[in-house]
Amino acid sequence: MSESHVKLAPSILAADFTRLGEEVAEVEKFAAASGVDRLHIDVMDGMFVPNISFGMPILKSLAKVTRLPLETHLMIEAPERYLEEFVASGATSLLVHAEGARHLHRTVQRIKSLGVKAGVVLNPATSLNVLEEILGDVDIVLLMTVNPGFGGQKFIRSMLPKIQRLRMMIHETNLGCELEVDGGVDPQTAADCVSAGADVLVAGSAVFGTHDGIEKALGRLAAAIKH
Ligand code: DX5
Ligand code: ZN
């Protein structure tokens, strides 16, 4: 089976923020060649995760300079407080954690009513069972392959069978839903994720944090997911 349909979602968390516009322009330049079809924007509040990143101002600035969709991963308590504001700031999809959204069904419906894609995110220790009553409603399921909060962590290999099981669930329930993975993705682990059934890979350090630049980094990831 050809795996050329697999997409990359570079996470700007690992970018050099003094040169964010330039780095994003470089990603965009090589996007078509490497399978990049969105940017991944990690919003952290220091409560849901033990780290604070950035929020609406960064989204608004990026929306002005890139045509890439801005997939926004909300690692915040009670994300339902901010859905409208993130969409108004340029988010093209909103991903909420099952562990942080008390009324997940309502939140997913509200995200869709705002005209953007809705995704549900699961932490490594969260069972796929929580998807049972919501899978048919979502556009994306994002499986964390590290504990959220920081870039540059080691991929948790025991998540590979979870990816496989989710692939089967999606096959049985919701053919249109994307299976995305986030955390510790590099050329080696990317290939494992694709073999397990992932069709979108988030990558931060493996895109923005390498010694030889974004073009080469994207080339390595693209080569890895085609095998
Ligand atoms: C972690 C974030 C990830 C992070 C991935 O909490 O959700 O998106 O940016 O970074 P890497 O690819 O470096 O593991
Ligand atoms: Zn993320």
Image: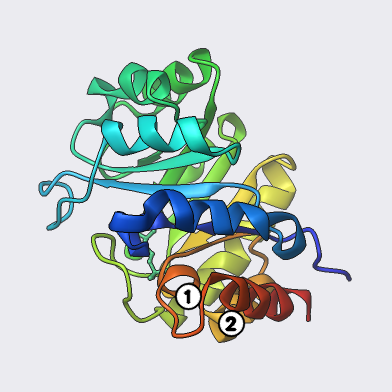
Give how far across and how far down residue 8 sits, in percent: 61, 60
At 57% from the left and 76% from the top, the residue drawn is: 217
Front one among 206 and 154: 206
Question: Which label was assigned to residue 187?
Answer: 2
Residue that appears at 28% across and 60% down: 148
Residue 208 placement (x, y as % from top left): 44, 69
Pointers 1 and 2 in contact (C-beta within 8 Å): yes
Could you tell me which quadrant the C terminus lies in? Answer: bottom right
- Percent x, y of residue 90: 44, 27
Q: CA distance from mark 1 to mark 2?
A: 8 Å
Q: Say which residue appears at 58% left-offset and 82% top-offset.
A: 187
- Asked if residue 215 shows in the view, the reply is yes
Looking at the rendered structure, the kind of residue marked 1 is: Ala
Q: Say which of 125 and 121 sits in front.
A: 121
The residue under the point 56% across, 34% down is 138
Q: Which residue is mark 1?
A: 206
